[in-house]
Image (cartoon, grey):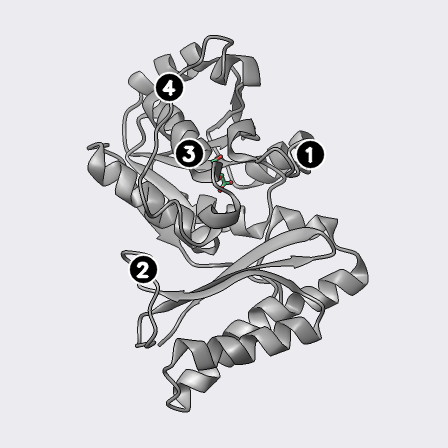
Amino acid sequence: MIPILINSIEEMSTICRQMIGKVGFVPTMGFLHQGHLSLVKEAKRISDVIIVSIFVNPTQFGANEDLSNYPRNIERDIKLLTELDVDYIFFPTNEQMYPNDFKTWVNVDKITQVLCGRSRPTHFRGVTTIVTKLMNIIEPDFMFMGEKDFQQLVVLRQMVKDLNFKTKIVGCSIKRERDGLALSSRNKYLTKIGREKALCLNKSLLLAQKLFNENIQSSDEIIAQMTDLIEDNEGVIDYIEAFDPNTLEHITNIVSGSRIALAIVIENTRLIDNIKIN
Ligand code: PAF
């Protein structure tokens, strides 16, 4: 069945208010890949009605980031979501989401200033604001988010807890290409050579796990070896960091359950990835 396409906030709210059964919501910025589709599949497993939003949220892009180039292909997205029997696709306009007199921001403190927040200081404020708006419009029972954006997941869980949202966030594992590259809409920017180089993200995370298995626990030591591997592949390091998965606090001694995340620029494209060490 073709999903019902809705671009009016009012119409989406009205429909959602009358919905019967558990509502599963997958927020996206479109240009869908198997990672997004795995979220939809997980949503279908535990919800009765599936809503996917497609909105390239301008407020989460910094001034020099890729908002205007961000890949879009709504026809293809609709086709993919039709194949998965999604019930509704919500794709509001910028003007509706951010009218001229828009003045309110949702901000989660501290954990938005570390990791990606250091080089993208306004990014998470944009994410938390748009997700709040989407959750208020849709009022879903479940919201599905990928672990590739691990910090985003932690930030949104904190927001949902602090602001008493009724929605439960379901975190879903990272989806990868056969060769290990984490799926991302931004992979599209890479040339063939760049894509090859980009494998160093996953390779360096696997190296970290290997070193941990060999009883190396010092994050400095592990990160030094990851750094060499990435620099050998001409990756420009934004950060590589080991942290506690709940607090996102930097750790010097890696234990089972710790996360290591990185952001690496390959051919001007900033890519992120992470691993749970165990
Ligand atoms: O992860 C994303 O695609 C975006 O940050 C989200 C959650 C859809 C908000 O714009």
Front residue of this view, candidates 162 and 182 = 162
Vertical comparison of 16 with 11: above or below: below
In terms of sequence position, does the residue under pointer 1 or pointer 3 come before the other?
1
Whether disc 4's CB lies below 8 Å from ligand 1 is answered no
**SS for tag 1?**
loop
Residue annotated with mark 3? 125
Query: How dense is the environment of label 1, judged by Cα within 10 Å: few (below 14), some, or many (20 and up)?
Result: few
Of tags 1 and 2, the one toward the viewer is: 2
Residues at marks 4 and 1, CA–CA distance in whole angstroms: 30 Å
Residue annotated with mark 4? 104
Front residue of this view, candidates 93 and 67 = 67
Percent position (x, y) of residue 27? 46, 35
Quadrant position of residue 30: top right
Of tags 4 and 1, the one toward the viewer is: 4
In terms of sequence position, does the residue under pointer 3 or pointer 2 come before the other?
3
Whether disc 3's CB lies below 8 Å from ligand 1 is answered no
Residue type at mark 2 is Glu
Which residue reaches farthest top? 101
